[in-house]
Image: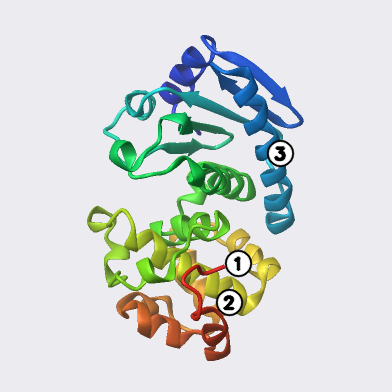
Amino acid sequence: MVEKNFIKRYDEIARSLNKIEIGSVIVFAEDSTQGKQIAVQLNSMINELHSFFGVKPKQISLLLVDSPDKITYLRSKPTPKWGVAVARAERIVAVNPKLWSIEFNNHLPAVFPNVLKHELTHSFAACLMGSGEKAMFFPQWFNEGLANYLGNQTNLKEAMKSHFNLISSPKKWAAKSEYHASGLIVGLLIKKIGSQNFVGFMKSIDSRKDFSINFKKTFGFSFSKLKRQPVKRKIDLIPTQLRIKQIKSKKFK
């Protein structure tokens, strides 16, 4: 269940903004023209992710806010400088990209669609699993790696800076390298077995314990073995032909 305080505060802020509804998307924004443009983008992303997951939320709402403090207020906990968006089931909140800059939040407005698709991926994962709580049966590196990869954010150069062993300890996560390393590994896993089988693996998880057991059955090697290795070694554990094809570009797609 989505946190009650989050829903209450989300709806409270939404009531003060313009409501733009297009297709299965609702955007709450001060600027109606901007809201319409983003709603169109969101509908396109929903169609893409529907093709991957095979399911989609009945409706997605996006709340555009004017400050990271609003995200802190919604989450009831501090938000890091780079934290410009967050998803809770079918509700997404994001700082207005017009305010983004390297100085302000380490993001340029141009990457807003990627961040939006990242958060939308979390919404789709929750829909696939039946709830946001069940989606948390996956370790953080898996959840964030999937969102990073499907959001077209995975950068090979950044990924290689990670030791990846930190991924099992979320408190030590770096803002960049751990996310990119996770995206790289998840992307390679998807390429190993295909998107349909990958989604099937996700649907097979009914508890945290299932993850390690079903991981080995699905991917052919132990998750614990993967977890202990640095990034470069992890890539070697996944079919070499996939690595050779993808590693040449700075942007892993």
Question: Residue, x 61% and y 45% (percent of image)?
Answer: 130
Confirm or deny contact between disc 2 and disc 1 (CB under 8 A): yes
Q: Alpha-carbon distance for marks 2 and 3? A: 32 Å
Q: Nearer the viewer, residue 73 or 160?
A: 160
Q: What residue type is labelled 3?
A: Asn
Question: Residue, x 72% and y 49% (percent of image)?
Answer: 55
Q: What element carries label 1?
A: helix
* Mark sitting earlier along the chain (2/3): 3
Q: Where is 9 relative to 22, above or below?
A: above
Residue 141 point in image, percent of width and height: 40, 61
Question: Residue, x 50% and y 75% (percent of image)?
Answer: 249
Residue occupied by mark 1: 201
Residue 142 point in image, percent of width and height: 46, 61
Confirm or deny contact between disc 2 and disc 3 (CB under 8 A): no
Residue farthest to the right, as pictured: 23
Residue 161 point in image, percent of width and height: 30, 70
Residue occupied by mark 2: 218
Question: Residue, x 34% and y 23% (percent of image)?
Answer: 73
Q: What element carries label 3?
A: helix
Q: Which amino acid does label 1 sit on?
A: Phe
Q: Where is 29 relative to 175, above or below?
A: above
Residue occupied by mark 3: 43
Q: What residue type is labelled 2?
A: Thr
